[in-house]
Amino acid sequence: MTDTPLRSRPILLEMASIVVAVILGFAVTNWGEARRDRARADAAMERIGMEVQANLGALAETVPYYGEMRQRLDSLIQVEGDLPLGEIEVAGWRGISPPSLRTASFDVAMSTGTLEHMDFAVVDQVAVAYESIGDFETTVDQGIAAALGGQMMTLADALTIFGLLSEVAAHAEAGLRLAADAMSG
């Protein structure tokens, strides 16, 4: 009976080593998963950054055009009155001409849960920027619907549409600039 504790020592040591091995296995697995999550988050942030820059490039052409049309339409109304849009030539007129803004990288990062592994302040700023892209796209859709609504559009109608587009596009551009700054800093 006195040798029973001696026999149980190897069993206890073996059990303890198994427990330590399992704990170490979990730790290594968690460490590997955290590294993969961080690598995915870094890659997603790089893709989102490229998308933000592409959207800024598209808006860099659009915002000045909308502002220019707003000024030209306002000047024409002051000089000619509120004529139907088709009765007078508006210099530089290209219609609404919305840019193609992309959101796929952000959408994928959001749907896969990758955003959870990124800095919250950066993600928050990027989310606000992408929300402003959605606002811009909604305004473009409403402007196109108004233009195609079957009524003769006047210069004042076009001025209203371009005024809204100008403001919302500038807001989207500002949001994207803030997102780009947050991502680089």
Image (cartoon, rainbow, N blue to C red):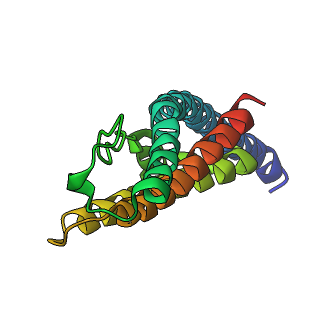
Instruction: Tell me the residue at 46%/54% (across/down).
Output: 79
Query: Which sits in the foreground, 116 or 54?
Result: 54
**Residue at far left of view:** 150
- Where is residue 104 drawn, in percent x and y? 38, 42
Instruction: Tell me how many marks there are.
Output: 0
* Left or right of 98 in this view: 169: right
For this rendering, which residue is in front, 65 or 21? 65
Q: Is residue 134 visible?
A: no
Q: Which residue lies furthest to the front in this view?
A: 79
Residue 137 appears at what percent x and percent y? 39, 56
Horizontal and vertical percent for residue 8? 74, 49
Within the image, what quadrant is residue 87 found in? bottom left
The one nearer the camera, 12 or 182, is 182
Q: Which image quarter holds the C terminus?
A: top right
Please indicate, yes or no, whether residue 176 appears anywhere in the rendered image: yes
**Residue 127 vertical position relative to residue 89 in the rendered view, above or below:** below
Q: Which residue is drawn at 33% across and 43% down?
A: 90
- Identify which residue is drawn at 65% across, 45% down: 174
